[in-house]
Every structure is written in C-alpha cells, then in structure tokens.
Amino acid sequence: MGVLSNSPTNMDNCIELCLKCLRACEECFTACLQEPDMQARKKCIQTLNDCAEICSQAAQYMSRNSEFSKQLCTLCATICDSCATECKMFNDNHCKECAQICLQCAEECRKMLS
C-alpha cells in the first residue's frame, strides 16, 4: 500500500471511490446520449467525460504513489463537484446516482489532502 497519507486505508478508499466514480460517469454518459433531450445535456456530457478521465488518472497516480497525487486529487475533487452539479440538473436516475457518487468521490479526494 502507498504512503501518500498516514493511512493506506484512506488511499485505498480514495482509489476505490475514484474507480466507482469513473464507472458511474461512463454509464451516465452513455445513458445521457440516449436521452431525448441530449442537446440540453451537452455541458453535462462534457463534464462527465472530464470527470471519468480525472478519476482514472487520480487512481493511477495514487496506485503508483506519485509525488503529484495530492495535486491531482485536488483537481479531481473540483471536477467531481462540477460533475455532480451538472448531473443534479437532470431528474433521471442515472444522473441522480452519478451526482451522489461524484460527491462521495470529491469528499474522499479531499481527505487525501490532509
């Protein structure tokens, strides 16, 4: 386990939530493309892409104990918050669930900074 924080469990939890968020964003992205109001979701869809990618990168950086993990976790938390805000604008289950997971991921990423 890594030495990014005092507790490897914190990092393990963060990696797991980043991967969970990555999956939720990819699934939500795919579902949003099928919605009849897809054009209204353009910003949400773009943010879902950004969020999925940053979550993947954050998990990779933490897994290899990169010296840049904390900076990436900061950015990941910011993008996850933004993605949650976008997803909350839509009332379907995939967006609601994704927003909730994004907020959990953002919170876990912020724990990595202490």
Image: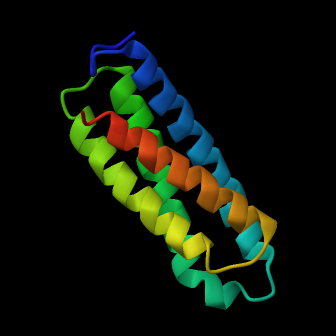
Q: Residue placed farthest to the left in the image?
A: 67
What residue is shown at x 66% (from left), y 51% (from top)?
A: 24
Q: Is residue 10 above or below residue 39?
A: above
What residue is shown at x 50% (from left), y 45% (from top)?
A: 105
Question: Where residue 99 appears, x then y in whole percent?
Answer: 61, 61
What residue is shown at x 38% (from left), y 41% (from top)?
A: 109
Residue 38 visible in the picture: yes
Left or right: residue 7 versus residue 12 is left
Which of the 4 quarters of the picture holds residue 31? bottom right
Disc tally is 0
Residue 30 visible in the picture: no
The C terminus - image quarter: top left
Q: Is residue 33 above or below residue 81?
A: below
What residue is shown at x 38% (from left), y 52% (from top)?
A: 77
Question: Where residue 35 appears, x then y in whole percent?
Answer: 79, 79
The N terminus - image quarter: top left
Q: Is residue 32 above or below residue 36?
A: above
Q: Is residue 65 above or below residue 33?
A: above
Question: Where residue 20 appears, x then y in whole percent?
Answer: 61, 40
Left or right: residue 99 versus residue 113 is right
Q: Nearer the viewer, residue 114 or 23?
A: 114
Question: Where residue 104 appears, x then y in whole percent?
Answer: 53, 47
Rendering colour mode = rainbow
